[in-house]
Structures are given as C-alpha cells and as structure tokens.
Amino acid sequence: MANISGNAYALTVLSPIKNGCIGDSSYQISYADEVQSRLHGLGVCEDSPLAKVPQTYLARFFILDDVFLESTPGCDSFCNLWDILSIFKERFRLLALPREDHLKSRYLVFSSNFHGDLESYLRGMWSAVSADIKHIWEHCVAFDRVQDVEGFIAYIKRCQLTANLFFNGSTDDPLEEQLKALYLKQQFVKFAVSHQGLGAAELQDAFRAFIGRVQPNQLATPTWRPGQSIP
Amino acid sequence: MSNIAGKAYAMNVITPIRWYMAWINRLIFLIAYRTPSTLRGLITLSLIHYARWVIIDRWKFPHLDPSQPKEDLHYSYMLFFSNFNGSWDQYVDSFTFAIPAGLDLFWKKNVRYPKSVPLTPFHDYIRHNQIDTDHYYNAYPLASSNDVKSAKHLKKKLIAFERAVRDAGPEEFLTKYHALLVEVQYDLGDMQPAPIVSLAAQAVDARRLLDAQRLLDAQGRR
C-alpha cells in the first residue's frame, strides 16, 4: 500500500465540515472559519498538541475551502489539440477552456507522517490529546457520533485517502530514536569542538564522562523533546 | 497560520486532472512505487523530509452523512503535500533544475500544467494552486532532513566507537578518536534555530513572543 514506506506511514484525512454558521444575530461565523480559527490558536513547536502524539514526525492541518479554476495559461496537450482544431470550428476553442468546479463542503485536511501502523498511531493520538481532537473536529460532519477511541479510528478511516506515492527522504526510525540521535549529534559536536588539543589521557577521561552524561543507548533520557525549538 | 515550522516548510498543492486520464498518473505512481530506483532524482534533493501524491476521484470525496451534499465535480484532483527545508523558491527551483522530466511526468495529465521549464509559468502554476497551512507541527524544528540522516549515522558510529575503546589505553584511544572524527566529519554540524526564510513567518514568531510576554506580564501583575 502506497501509504507506507518502510516503517513510515503517510496519513491523509479529509473531514467534511458542516455547512452553515454558529453564533447569534450579533455575531456569526461559519463552521469552517471557526475550525480555522481554532487551528490558528493552537500552540506551536513543543506547545503543539501534536507534540504529545507519539511517533509524529511532521503533521499539518489546513482548511480546503474550494478547488481552483485553472485560469492560467498552460501547455496541456488537450488544450493544444482543441486550439488547433478551432481553425475548423469555433466550438473547439470553447472546449479548450477549463471547466469550473466548486466544492459543496469545506474540508478539514489532516496530514501526518509518523512511525508505525495506523491503528496504534490513532490510539496513541486519542489517548494523548482527545480533548484537542474534539476541539478541532467538533464541527465536522458526523464527528458528533465519535464517543471513544474505536469511534475515532472508524471515523478517521472513513475520511482517509490512500496515497498514490509516498516518498520518504528521511529515516523511518521510531521518533525516540531520531530525537536521541539528534541530541547525541548536537552534544558530540559541542564535545569535539570544546576538547580540541587535549592530551590523550585527559581526552579519554573527558570522553568517558561525556558518554556517562549523554547515555547513547538510553532513548528515554537525556534526549530532545518532541517539537523542541530551543537548542 | 504558518507554512513554516522550524527548518521545515509545508507545501499543499491541489490540481485538477481529467477523471478519464487519472489512470495514467496512477500508473506512473505505481511504477515509481514498485521500482524505487525511479525516485533516484528525488533522493538527490536531500532537502525533502517526506512527500506524497494523492489522487481523489471526483466521486470519492469523503461523504459521511446524508445531510452532507454530494460533490458534483468535472475533474478528479491531485493533492501534493511536501515537507522540505529551505524557502519556497529554493524548493521549487531545485525541482525544476534537478528533475524537470520527473516533475513533468508526475503532473503529466493535470489540466493546464505548464511544464517545469521555463520557470516563471511553473512558479505561477504552483502559486495559483497552493493552499496555506493553518497549523504545522515538526518534531525537530532545529533539524533539517540531512541532520536527521546524519545523526542516525553518527549515533551508530559513536556507539561502536565507545565499545571499541572501552578498554583501550590513552594513546590507542586518541588514535581511534581522531579516526572517528575523520570518518564522521560530514555528519557534524551545530543545529540552531532556522535563519529567516519568510518575513511572514518571522512576523508570526514576533507576534507570538509578544503575546507570551504580555501573558507573563499579566500573570505577574495578578
């Protein structure tokens, strides 16, 4: 399945948002704008709710308001063909014009790149940030039927789209492994720079102390926190 | 709203494709998926963390309830999501310069795709069809994709080195330590917050800092 590349998974979700507005006569806002406003209010980096979701490498939310009319010039073979044929009949020129599409619902798009399988990921997500999930998806169609983790998994699967191609240009290791490796890299660079020119015995002692401090085989700690934005 | 999280940029592009031609793109993606060597060009663009292409048939937009109106579209749509390092221009230009033929193949049957060369119409096409991200999360904002890959290599070498020199004398340790530094020299590099690649993202950061400061001040006054 093209959602998977090694141990990395590409989740693509399109959740339709209810049409209509909330609020009273003094202030009204569409459901989709309300969802967007909630997304803008989420914390960033280590304060993002997604930082608490196990195994998330990179993830995003956005609102798909509508699709675009391809009004810019292009070199589409169909258009070129119709253009050539238009020397015989004017109606061929009209065929070259792009059709206008509009969506009838606006969609909350959630895309995540993570380590592991989908069900474990969604279980971890629900268990870590169920309050945030309800806050974000509250105004989506049929989300009011989601009561527990099983309901959430079933809901996401109904909204899921299968990727046709997933390209992994990074690694597919567990997130803890990636974060520990990055922590070690940062620490070792500092060590190498600050211990230049030492004698053999002194350097060896310093290296032993360094290894004791950074614990290369301990993934849990010391390490970088998910979303850590300050070195 | 921000397309940027640390050193990563989130690109979302949605483009129409004639429903009766989508199978050609699907076939191209299937061949690329089954024969990863075809993606060698993409791998040379080491600035990419993860990217995906998703084709939605015009009748397959999620429909969850009878109260939701069914979509009635002329075209199917192709979604492209990418997570990369650097600025928008660097990314789009590197695609054009490094793998123009591959790029044209992936968007081959999309309506009014202008081809990746020349550059300006291609820029216009991507800009026209791009949607901004409302919330973007990156587990390692300080790191680029190359940092993640090099950190993996460095960790492996460091653990092996530590085992190898555990019982070594100082002189042997020093010799092997220098050899380690030579071996991992391309994996070394300090990771710091990203330079400014977008004035809009910088403004968002400044605003967030200001809001946080105001919140702290308000809490201090209480």
Image (cartoon, rainbow, N blue to C red):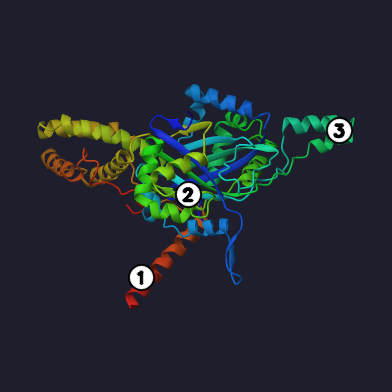
Whole-Å distance between the Cαs marked 1 and 2? 39 Å
* Subunit bearing disc 3: A
Residue B107 location (% of width, % of height): 62, 33
Which circle, 1 or 2, is nearer the viewer? 2
- Relative to A41, is A197 above or below? above
Q: Which secondary structure, mark 3?
A: loop
Please tell me which residue is depicted at 36% across the width and 38% down the height of the picture.
A120
Instruction: Please say whether residue B84 is visible from this viewpoint.
Output: no
Few, some or many residues within 10 Å of mark 3 (<14, 14–19, 20+):
some
Residue A52 position in % (x across, y down): 35, 50
Tags 1 and 3 on a common chain: no
Residue at the disc numbered 1? B216
Residue for badge 2: A145
Please report whichever mark, 2 or 3, sits nearer to the chain's N-terminal start: 3
Q: Residue at x 66, y 44 (%)?
A: B124
Q: Relative to A125, does residue B185 appear above or below in the rendering?
A: above
Which chain's residue wears label 2? A
Residue that protrudes farthest toward the bottom in the picture: B221
The residue that disc 3 covers is A86
Mark on residue A192?
none
Residue under disc 2 on the same chain as residue under disc 3:
yes
Residue type beneath disc 1 = Leu
> Which is more toward the observer, A201 or A101?
A101
Pinpoint the chain carrying mark 1.
B
Q: Position of residue A162 (x, y in %)?
A: 52, 34
Task: Choose mark 2 or mark 3, whichever is in front.
Answer: 2
Q: What percent of the width, then of the height, locates residue A164?
A: 53, 31
